[in-house]
Amino acid sequence: MKIKFHFLYLPAFLALLFLGQELHDWAHFIAAEIFCGCWGSKGFDSWTICDHCAITKDIGVFIFFAGPFATYIIIWSAWWLMSHNHTGKQRSAGFALLFAAIPFVRILAAMAGGGDETRCLRELFQNADGSNRHIVALAGLFFVCLLTIPALLRAFILLPGLREKVFLFPIFLVVPMYVHQWILKGLMTKLLERGFLNNEVFPGIPILVIAWAFLWIMVLWLTYKNLLNFFEKAV
């Protein structure tokens, strides 16, 4: 097995990256509408619940775990696709799916005592006086690691050589997190705040947010085949 790069791998991977994060946020947003019966608002890497929605503890857990649930479906689909009994194309797809889900950001958030997963555990198990907050935070970290590390280990093992493991693995692990932050928070959110295409085409959803999602759907549709040839048999 060896690695093959194509210049269209980058736009294809970026499309998968941004659409994976859109799926995460839309899962939150739609879950909030289902339980609240009203639409909140959605931006880039952000969402809100409608103002008159009264959230109970149980409903809040469902809403805040909806996003991670969608992300973990992607991560474990990637884990399955990267198994030894799949083809090089399927393994390539799994590898791209895994890192497009940005699993490292979930680990970092849990290490800091935050993230959706830990927030849900706090809602369910943290004492009113916060006396067990450290235990809950550790439980959140353990939960996140349990759901992310198996797939990361499989991706690490799948890389063919020491050079790829030492250089490529950290790049795929860390760089997508920063790219996502720089483009969405550093560019797209600022455009929205300045009023660019901020008219709402649906309740709480600006035109720019919809256009962004459709743009990357088109990019992925045109370039996805380049994600399937990352791993190929050595001649």
Image: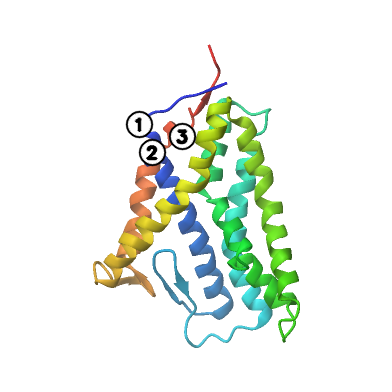
Type of amino acid under label 1: Phe
Res 169 → quadrant: top right
Estimate the spatial distance between the alpha carbons at disc 1 and disc 2, rounded to whole Å: 7 Å
Mark 3: give few (<14), some (14-19) or many (20+) Cα within 10 Å.
Answer: many
Estimate the spatial distance between the alpha carbons at disc 3 and disc 2, rounded to whole Å: 9 Å
Identify the mark at residue 142; answer none if there is no mark.
Answer: none
On the image, numbered disc 2 is attached to which residue? 10
Name the front one of labels 3 and 1: 1
The residue lying toward the viewer, choosing from 128 and 198, is 128
Position in image of residue 190 (x %, y %): 30, 67
Q: Are marks 1 and 2 in contact (CB under 8 Å)?
A: yes
Residue 143 visible, this orientation: yes
Name the front one of labels 3 and 2: 2
128 versus 138 height, above or below: below
Q: Decide which of tag 3 and tag 2 comes sooner along the chain.
A: 2
The residue lying toward the viewer, choosing from 94 and 154, is 154
Quadrant holding the N terminus = top right
Identify the mark at residue 227; answer none if there is no mark.
Answer: 3
Dot 1: element: loop
Q: Specify the color scheme.
A: rainbow
91 versus 135 height, above or below: above
On the image, numbered disc 1 is attached to which residue? 7
The residue lying toward the viewer, choosing from 34 and 79, is 79
Position in image of residue 198 (x %, y %): 28, 70
